[in-house]
Image (cartoon, rainbow, N blue to C red):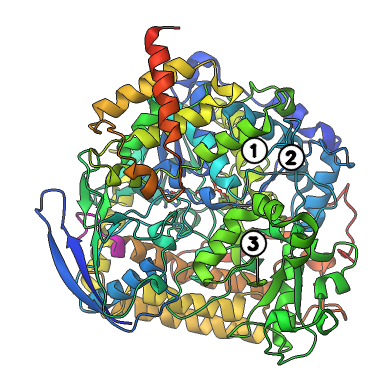
Amino acid sequence: MNLDAKIPSGPIAEKWDKHRFNLKVVNPANKRKYKVLVVGSGLAGASAAASLAELGYDVDCFCFQDSPRRAHSIAAQGGINAAKNYQNDGDSIYRLFYDTVKGGDYRAREANVYRLAQVSNNIIDQCVAQGVPFARDYGGLLANRSFGGAQVSRTFYARGQTGQQLLLGAYSALSRQIGAGKVKMHARTEMLDLVLVDGHARGIVTRNLVSGKIQSWAGDAVILATGGYGNVFYLSTNAKGCNVTAAYRAYKRGAGFANPCFTQIHPTCIPVSGDYQSKLTLMSESLRNDGRVWVPAEGGDKRAAGDISEAERDYYLERRYPSFGNLVPRDVASRAAKKACDEGRGVGETGLGVYLDFADAINRLGEDQVRARYGNLFHMYEKITGENPYQVPMRIYPAVHYTMGGLWVDYNLMSNVPGLHVLGEANFSDHGANRLGASALMQGLADGYFVIPYTIGDYLATSSGDKVSTEQQEFKDAEAQANQQVDKFLSIGGKRSPDSFHKELGKIMWEYCGMARNEAGLKTALEKIPALREEFWENLSVPGSGADFNTTLEKAGRVADFLEFGEMMCNDALLRTESCGGHFREEYQSEEGEALRDDENFCHGAIWEYSGAGNAPTRHREELEFEYVKLTQRSYK
Amino acid sequence: MNLTLKVWRQSGPQDKGKIVDYAVKDINSHMSFLEMLDVLNEELIAKGEEPIAFDHDCREGICGSCSMMIDGIPHGPDRGTTACQLHMRRFKDGDVVYVEPWQAKAFPVIKDLVVDRSAFDRIIQSGGFVSINTGNAQDANALPVNKDSAEAAFDAAACIGCGACVAACPNASAMLFVAAKVSHLGKLPQGQPERAKRVQSMVSTMDTEGFGSCTNTFECEAACPKEISVTNIAQMNRDYMQSSLGD
Ligand SMILES: Cc1cc2nc3c(=O)[nH]c(=O)nc-3n(C[C@H](O)[C@H](O)[C@H](O)COP(=O)(O)OP(=O)(O)OC[C@H]3O[C@@H](n4cnc5c(N)ncnc54)[C@H](O)[C@@H]3O)c2cc1C
Ligand code: FES
């Protein structure tokens, strides 16, 4: 497997400029001769599709929702980082770079992260120019807030709906290109396979979710911007449709899958209330700016929050991490909450919850100010729990939120399969073992607006330029396989729904490959998952037909992939015998219970290569070198 | 609690469709309305029957996927709430609840509760944007925007494109949807250069897509899960008049 990261030489601050100059360009008249297939219309996909079409490429874009505007990015709440230093509080590109590498627990590639910090400022400019209504101060200039893992205020936001506003900005740019006939949009269309011709990614196979038609598409390059795989846990903050299918099928066609076990558990979500629960709801991290996290000092204290005096409370984040306090990074905050609950100090009916209390903020700022900052989040909380957070503290608990792992890409965002580019949450590039808040939106848009428009030209300009046709055998074979799978699902005729298998898989993953992992547990999961998968293929029930709109059939395909992918995650977690960022192996922790890295043996990305059905995949490495940010034990004390 | 659901079942665009009764039992009041439908669907699948098709994704009230009439009201009885955010504590034991798809000529039914809302996308494609290519932007703070305008633009931009406004309107008009976008961009300096052209093309596309005209019943505002104000419609009408006069 060729894992050359193609990091440009030279000082880090000059790499991207130099690289841009060295990249081959496709001349303007030739661009329209190249067809680019963009799968995904979230921040990464929509921004890429729009920008490439503006440059003149012939673009087809695909998404499974009924409109590109509904991609999961729409749900992001808190904000987007940029190194503008508008607050004059000492921020800089270098600081954003440094914070991101450190926050990622030194498992990301320095050069990529530096570029991300560099282009962060262009993103804000671009979005404002599109009419994204970011929050502003009375002087009319942009406002900022703070997020975890940073000591400066660099997060731009649009109330609690930043993702919505950014996505609508990208969607409007995309719509403009669709209207101009430069992008052909295929909504309600799900990618089921990647097609390689002579080792290059030259097309995809899709299923039209309305007509059921399975069809191929040929192009000169393929971009996957299909989001993260957090739904392998069934319960997560991701939208219901989020899945690993596109990335996993690419993996099966030879693309390396990097660090699948790096998943992020977000500390502030609404706790699970019952078995019927279909998803978990995030309460944005921005709430930790003004909310204070606490549990009763004594275990088993079941009194109402208001009856517990200050002296009987433990503001454990402020106590354990005085300099970052409530704003420690997510992995640290999540584990601290789990610890408090494991000690029997959890709150709420299930005991799996901690308080996030706004009483002080309301006293200090007044209820109106608090409402202006977080009104929609408080509203959402009240809708779901029936409790009013202006009066009683919120109850929160960690939940699966984001996946740092993804398809391996080089500096050009191209996977090891030539022509296959991967953007946004679907790739593994920038966040190492833990992502800082407000950095996913930044990365998705950086990839789509400011990286791929340059780097894809280099691939296209140096590729053969031969056209392929969907009549070729490679396409016909892939279509036949997709059809066979649909027929198989419909013919099993068992008793259990895809969701019931998905829930069971989710419980296994959460129990053994969730917030804390250990060898014995991972081995148990590795026994349970194949057994569940076997039952799936014998006892699945998918009513209806393949020739029309069939949501059960859609789910069956996604669950089938999760059932294989979950195993790869557990294997990855098992073999990474260290703790880093979101990957916490209980055997490897410091005396104070913090994650203990093993830089000598694990300062690398682990990249999995598919070796055929029934064979164990091969684990490769990309060694990481840290020239600028010194490897140290993270400390947020 | 136990409920009787009367659900619109329609196997495809050609099917006539009908209401089918379902008894749902032991519903927990903390469930969301969609989770209640999940429970029913699981039972149907276990029996080998086709589950009720409905659109949904984020289940957080932001993606605009979920779309159903609950007892004749788009998204159900709670104001400012999408169907996915409606919780069963709003209902009581023994209730009979009607669940139907959006009904509008411009939103043909695909299956059961799922409709085709691509007409909304086409309206946006005809002008709901600022024409700025990637890379052309100036520094974000070079253009201060009065805070009140920014807030007002945000209020309009909060639209999730669910189509409840159309479903609620006796004429199936898309005025609130179009007005929300026209106002969002019209209230910002970035939106000015194309202001006249935008409103003209969006309104014209709205008409060709088969949406009805607005007769000021304001049902749209009452149904909007994001509580977008009908004052946007007045603003749009002014913009439209002015741009028609050619200045
Ligand atoms: C509740 C929540 C809040 C968040 N808040 C923040 C925040 O405040 N700040 C921040 O920086 N990050 C936040 N994040 C993370 C961030 O939103 C995501 O990481 C980011 O939006 C992902 O963007 P994307 O473009 O990579 O993928 P997505 O937005 O997930 O888009 C994926 C696209 O791919 C398509 N797709 C997927 N599979 C297929 C397939 N097989 N065939 C065809 N199409 C397919 C989908 O239709 C969709 O269009 C949040 C995440 C969640 C869950
Ligand atoms: S499912 Fe997204 S708004 Fe209801």
Chain ID of residue with mark 3: A
Chain ID of residue with mark 1: A
- Tell whether label 1 touches label 2 (CB within 8 Å): yes
Cα–Cα gap, marks 2 and 3: 35 Å
Residue A189 picture location, percent across and down: 34, 47
Report the quarter where the C terminus of chain A lies: bottom right
Q: Amino acid at mark 2?
A: Ala
- Disc 2: which residue: A143
Q: What are the residue bounds of the magenta stretch?
A: A545-553
- The answer to whether residue B185 is visible is yes
Residue located 46% across and 55% down the image: B61
Question: Is B247 rendered above or below residue A455?
Answer: above
Of helix, strand and loop, which one carries label 1?
A: loop
Ligand 2: image quarter: bottom left
Residue A479 picture location, percent across and down: 29, 50
- Disc 3: which residue: A259
Q: Is residue A60 left or right of residue A375?
A: left
